[in-house]
Amino acid sequence: MSASGRPIRPDLPDMLDVGGRQARRRRRGIRALEAAVAVPVVLALLLIGALLFDVITDTVSWQVIEPAGSGRSFSFAEGFAALGAWERVMRLELAARGVSDADADALLADPDERRVLRARNRVELMPWVDGRPFRWLVTTARDDLVADVPLIGGAGGRRELLASAEAGQVVVLNAWLDAGFLSRNASRSPMTAGLLPALLGSLLLVALVIVIAVPLGVGAAVYLEEYAADTKISRLIELNLSNLAGVPSVVYGILGLTVFVRLMRLGPVVLAGALTLALLVIPVVVVAAREAIRSVPPSLRQAAYGLGAARSQVVFRVVLPSAIGGITTGVVLAIARTIGETAPLLVLGAAAFVPRPPDGVLSTFTAVPIQIYTWVSENDVEFTHAASAAIVVLLAVLGLLYGLAFYLRRRFARRW
């Protein structure tokens, strides 16, 4: 207050009110921005959830089948065995077809006949067969599909399905994703098709990519961060690595087709696919490893040098152990990207149909994404169910890898 009793700053209340209005407007703007960001995120999550629900439910379907075999189902107790359930159920099926015990013994004892039986007959524990739960059923590639009803649509119409089935037809709740789906070889028939060749092909590709890409990527990151001088060449390498990490994967497929398949004459084999995918993920590994190495405090290096350690000792005994969490996370995420890649392998010439798993790095191969693409391209609703089952398997593998990356990040995280 002044000597006359008047405020020194008569406009101070107005200024405080203006500041309050500005703070309220700022808070309203932040809330509006948060809402604008939250709406598309929620919509995306809802769409992903709907897509996952559709894919998961598509792995199970109600079917009316006219079997080429006996058409009989067997109770869980009749066919169950800790080991050899397939043979036990197959004996019951052969007996139902009128095959004598001696002939059945001869068929199952002959390795070639046994292999043919396994390839042509699918022995599965169905959740529901002709109104009875958990029954063993033998289906073959020659069965005729009369009707295929989605899981949700047929859940309330089971009685109608049973009433519509004619004599000699079987109504089943067919679960496509089961242990047999993962252990069977590929087939031209959806009833006997399995994911084993594609799954082992993907695992072999991943193993080779780890062997090729991880040493090269981590080694390049160590060189650029710890040894390379700040020259035009090193800056050019850094720029190219950043650009290569964003190159579309199909470009790497063209490169692999030109260099590995045609120039090196490897052909579309596992090794060519692994080399192509290694080129794809090496920039990602380098960028992740460099960020992890860069996050190590300089004081650790200085302390090691102060104790008389050589540069190699500082790098391999101080820096890399301290950066192992970030490096491992980057490698796992790069491997997860490798498993889901389709375009480079298609351009490379990977086979759409491989009846058996690859037996070496120079054998033809297929992968899970290619198998999914092939099944979806078939004009057959049953192959669509098989593709949905393969998608669930692929998502489960990717989920495990991302979970492993999260765990390793937390496990080796260090606060400096």
Image (tube, rainbow, N blue to C red):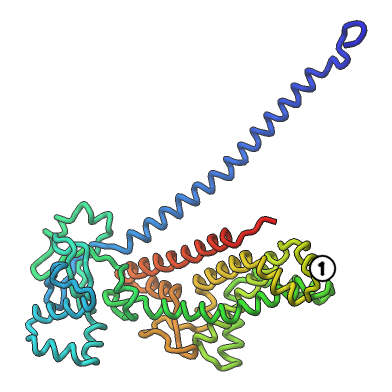
- What is the x, y in percent for residue 297? 74, 61
Quarter location, residue 62? bottom left
- What is the x, y in percent for residue 259? 61, 87
Asked if residue 388 can be seen in this view, the reply is: yes
* Residue occupying image coordinates x 16% and y 78%: 88
Quarter location, residue 230? bottom right
**Foreground of the two, 125 or 280:** 125
Q: With 229 as the anchor, is 110 left or right in this view?
A: left
Query: Which quarter shows the C terminus?
Result: bottom right
Amino acid identity at mark 1: Gly
Quarter location, residue 257? bottom right
Q: Residue furthest right?
A: 3
Establish if 304 lies above or below 345.
Answer: above
Q: Residue furthest top?
A: 4
* Residue occupying image coordinates x 33% and y 59%: 57
Asked if residue 288 can be seen in this view, the reply is: no
Q: With 171 as the anchor, is 340 left or right in this view?
A: right
**Foreground of the two, 100 or 194:** 100
- What is the x, y in percent for residue 42? 50, 47
Total labels: the figure holds 1
Q: Residue furthest front?
A: 307
**Foreground of the two, 369 or 196:** 196
* Residue occupying image coordinates x 59% and y 81%: 212
Query: Which quarter shows the N terminus?
Result: top right
Q: Which residue is mark 1?
A: 306
**Foreground of the two, 281 or 250:** 281
Neighbourhood count class around disc 1 (C-alpha, 10 Å): few under 14, some 14–19, many 20 upward: few
Q: Circle 1 sits in a helix, a strand or a loop, which is it? A: helix
- What is the x, y in percent for residue 340? 50, 70
